[in-house]
């Protein structure tokens, strides 16, 4: 049986948007990795009532409650005091915590003061969790079969406790099942159209496999999830489900969560012994950035020209003035010259070029914001496509980047 968990993040800085709650995402992933399901994440203010009410609610839903934040030495950090009262405990000096705090400060040449000393005072009804990366110890309480764990809000301190103590002990203390996910990346099709193609497939999935659509600009992820006591059996089930999916939408599948599009393209180029260059206008180097995010990309990626101005298009890529004047920079004629020009400039086997109106300004009735031309080229052919991505600048850049990489992937596969 899967254990349910709830995460509570404490801090006004989160509620006013001053700090982004990255802790919850990390904790949820870590818990999922050992077979614990997070059923709710709650952010609350630095008040005793908020902490107490959140605790009461969480204990109705979950067998494991994890709190982060409010354990510092200053007056606005009230989590420890509130939890001490909540569990009917007394604050006492913990010698192990004091020794750890002293050692931590001494190693950094910092003098101990009364605020640091106060952090060695912990509730006498909790188990103290060592903090190797700070001065605030964690606290592990139990109430009516529910584990309640309080940790600092500083990410690296929280992660140190989770990795060093909490996750290993949860695995040891409970017979946890496996929760297995497999995420498939699709590109070039909208979520609604994808759902229509997969309607029968979804209906035929085994009951113990759940599938979710996770749309983002330029891509829709399909997440498959199952759980149980035998990891190998679960993995085989998901592999069968994905294999069947490949027979239904093969043209739209571009990779997995662990095998992203840019990595797949790189592996194809390495396999072919081929090289790549890019000429980017509207994407502004985004394609080159994704390509070079893959370790070892220097084996196949030669370079890029950020041809944002017409002068660069003409003087570096060899785009003709007549085509720029007659058709404009965002046109089929210009994108063909751009992709041919960069391929010739860098002497590469393949090339990508983009030119478009990312927005929010610059559009016309003939070429509205989002109009984008993309070209990919090899020594044998040039493939050109026109797209209308929408009116949001960042989404347009992301969509153009992923679409261009997928066009290249298809070209390489066709010529392989």
Image (tube, rainbow, N blue to C red):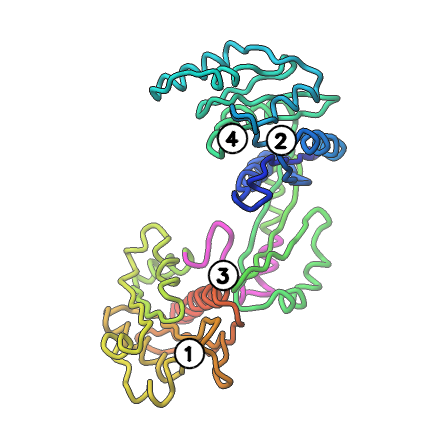
Q: Are discs 4 and 2 less than 8 Å apart at CB?
A: no
Q: Which residue is mark 4?
A: 158
Which of the two labelled residues, at mark 1 and mark 4, occupies the earlier sequence position?
4
Which of the two labelled residues, at mark 2 and mark 3, occupies the earlier sequence position?
2
User: Residue 92: horizontal and vertical position, in percent?
Assistant: 59, 11
Q: Which residue is mark 1?
A: 384
Is 108 located above or below residue 65 in the figure?
above
Which span of residues is magenta-colored?
Answer: 240-262
Q: Are discs 1 and 4 less than 8 Å apart at CB?
A: no
The part of the image, by quadrant, that contains residue 232 is top right
**Front: mark 1 or 2:** 2
Q: Is residue 65 left or right of residue 93?
A: right
SS for tag 1? strand
Which of the two labelled residues, at mark 4 and mark 3, occupies the earlier sequence position?
4
Q: Are discs 2 and 3 less than 8 Å apart at CB?
A: no
* Crowding near the residue tagged with mark 4, few <14, some 14–19, many ≥20 C-alpha atoms within 10 Å: many
**Front: mark 1 or 3:** 1
Q: Residue shown at 34%/56% (left/top)? A: 292
Q: Disc 1 and disc 4: Cα gap in Å?
A: 50 Å
User: Residue 346: horizontal and vertical position, in percent?
Assistant: 24, 68
Q: Nearer the viewer, residue 123 or 388?
A: 123
Q: Which residue is mark 2?
A: 66
Q: Are discs 4 and 3 less than 8 Å apart at CB?
A: no
- Quadrant containing the C terminus is bottom left
Q: Nearer the viewer, residue 298 or 264?
A: 298
Q: Which residue is mark 3?
A: 254
Is 62 located above or below residue 185 in the figure?
above
**Front: mark 4 or 3:** 4
SS for tag 2? strand
Q: Is residue 163 magenta?
A: no
Is 364 located above or below residue 230 in the figure?
below
Which of the two labelled residues, at mark 1 and mark 2, occupies the earlier sequence position?
2
């Amino acid at each position: 049986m899967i254990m349910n968990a709830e995460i509570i993040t404490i801090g006004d800085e989160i509620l006013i948007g001053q700090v982004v709650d990255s802790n919850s995402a990390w904790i949820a992933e870590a818990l999922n990795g050992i077979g614990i399901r997070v059923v709710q994440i709650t952010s609350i203010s630095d008040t005793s009532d908020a902490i107490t009410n959140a605790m009461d609610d969480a204990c109705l839903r979950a067998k494991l409650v994890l709190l982060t934040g409010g354990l510092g030495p200053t007056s606005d950090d009230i989590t420890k005091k509130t939890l001490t009262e909540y569990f009917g405990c007394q604050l006492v000096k913990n010698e192990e915590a004091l020794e750890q705090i002293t050692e931590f400060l001494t190693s950094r040449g910092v003098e101990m003061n009364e605020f640091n000393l106060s952090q060695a005072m912990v509730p006498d009804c909790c188990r103290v969790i060592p903090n190797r990366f700070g001065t605030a110890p964690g606290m592990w309480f139990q109430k009516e079969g529910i584990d309640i764990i309080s940790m600092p809000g500083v990410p690296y301190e929280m992660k140190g406790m989770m990795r060093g103590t909490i996750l290993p002990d949860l695995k040891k203390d409970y017979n946890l099942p496996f929760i297995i996910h497999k995420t498939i990346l699709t590109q070039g099709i909208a979520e609604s159209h994808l759902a229509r193609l997969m309607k029968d497939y979804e209906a035929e999935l085994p009951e113990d496999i759940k599938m979710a659509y996770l749309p983002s600009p330029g891509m829709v992820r399909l997440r498959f999830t199952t759980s149980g006591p035998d990891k190998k059996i679960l993995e085989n089930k998901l592999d069968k489900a994905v294999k069947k999916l490949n027979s239904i939408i093969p043209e739209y599948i571009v990779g997995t969560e662990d095998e992203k599009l840019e990595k797949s393209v790189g592996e194809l180029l390495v396999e072919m012994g081929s090289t790549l260059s890019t000429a980017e206008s509207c994407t502004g180097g985004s394609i080159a950035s994704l390509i070079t995010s893959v370790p070892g990309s220097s084996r196949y990626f030669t370079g890029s020209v950020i041809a944002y101005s017409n002068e660069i298009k003409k003087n570096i890529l060899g785009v003709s003035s007549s085509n720029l004047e007659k058709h404009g920079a965002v046109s089929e004629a210009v994108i063909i010259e751009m992709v041919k020009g960069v391929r010739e400039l860098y002497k590469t086997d393949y090339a990508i070029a983009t030119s478009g109106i990312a927005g929010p300004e610059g559009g016309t009735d003939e070429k509205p914001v989002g109009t984008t031309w993309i070209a990919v080229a090899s020594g044998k052919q040039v493939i050109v496509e026109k797209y209308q991505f929408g009116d949001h600048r960042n989404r347009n850049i992301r969509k153009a980047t992923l679409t261009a990489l997928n066009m290249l992937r298809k070209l390489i596969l066709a010529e392989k």
